[in-house]
Amino acid sequence: MQEFQYNSKAMKIPFLSLVTLVCLLLFMGGSSYAQIPNNDFEIWDSTAGYKTPVGWDNMNPNTYSTTVLTCERMVPGHTGAYHLALNTQTVSSSIVPGIAVSGLLDPTTHKPASGFPYSSRPQVLAGSWQYMAYTTADQGFIEVLLSKWNTTTSHRDTVAFTHYLLPGMVMYWADFHLPLTYYSSATPDSAIIFLSASGPTPVAYSFLWVDGLRFADSATLGNNMVSKTKTEFNIRPNPAHGSAQIEYKSDRSQNVKYTLTDIAGRLHHSSSFMALPGNNSELIDVSDLPNGLYFVKLVDEFGIAEQKLTIN
């Protein structure tokens, strides 16, 4: 996993009011950094002439002069009075994605520049959502990064990460939980949550609505959020020669990721597929790999599972 680097001191935030900054300090200093700032999107600042969710940077400062907003406060909320609505829009003949980041956003690259202090090791990001890609050419995502400052290298090291592509559409409020993949045993000191209604090539009118975000462990999610108790899959044939097939049963449409590593931990294959309700299969080409023992790791909405694969 490549280390994540940012320099929060270099970022300027002229559009944030004094009220917003005070609210940010209150959110980030009162609970040992145990919660996501403004996680239910109930607090909004309007001193700049438009509403923006406290603690969440977005593209509104760049588009407000055209009277177009890509980040809006909507009613009613799923877990309160309001929810966050991200809408990809056409602005002066350009397409601006509906994005929000829990921290600071680089308005040029549309990437996160910094996050918020956080010092726990949760298993999932949970919440509620609605979303729709306006065309199949667009696909929004949710990204989570937990990192820790490395005093030796003066860079940020990745502790945990997930990048979840939004499949299909959800036109009513539904609960979700996205598993985090850990790459280090360290305790993080920072977290970033990146919400986007669109992918690398945004399409106008794609949207993502979010409410009630929280980090959690699987045991605290509640039975109403899951209809499947664990992540499972099979590999056939095993031992394999030339190719192997992942067999996976899903109870919903979801994006599933998998990796193939050797016994030394070197990554040989990494891909994803769209699982549909019922039985699914995905072919892995292993014809270019030498004989030996390998590990296939699969990540879905419910967790992570790993199987040994012998190639001969």
Image: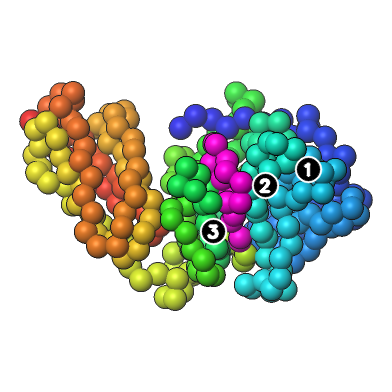
Mark 2 highlights which residue? 89
Q: Nearer the viewer, residue 153 or 58?
A: 58
Disc ID at residue 131? 3
**Residue 295 at what x, y percent from top left?**
24, 39
Mark 1 crowdedness (10 Å alpha carbons): few <14, some 14-19, many ≥20: some
287 sits left or right of 159 in the view: left
Q: CA distance from mark 2 to mark 1?
A: 10 Å
Q: Nearer the viewer, residue 34 or 243?
A: 243
Q: Which residues make up the magenta segment?
A: 194-210
Q: Nearer the viewer, residue 85 or 41?
A: 85
- Is residue 35 among the parts visible in the rendering? no
Please identify the residue farthest to the front as the structure is shown.
93
Residue at the location (38% across, 51% down)?
255
The image shows residue 128, relative to residue 166, as above or below, that is below
Mark 1 highlights which residue? 63
Q: Earlier in the sequence, mark 3 or mark 2?
A: 2
The quadrant holding residue 81 is: bottom right
- Element marked by disc 3: strand
Q: CA distance from mark 3 to mark 1?
A: 22 Å
Q: Earlier in the sequence, mark 3 or mark 1?
A: 1
179 sits left or right of 282 in the view: right
Q: Amino acid at mark 2?
A: Gln
**Residue 192 at what x, y percent from top left?**
62, 45
Q: Amino acid at mark 3?
A: Tyr
Mark 2 crowdedness (10 Å alpha carbons): few <14, some 14-19, many ≥20: many
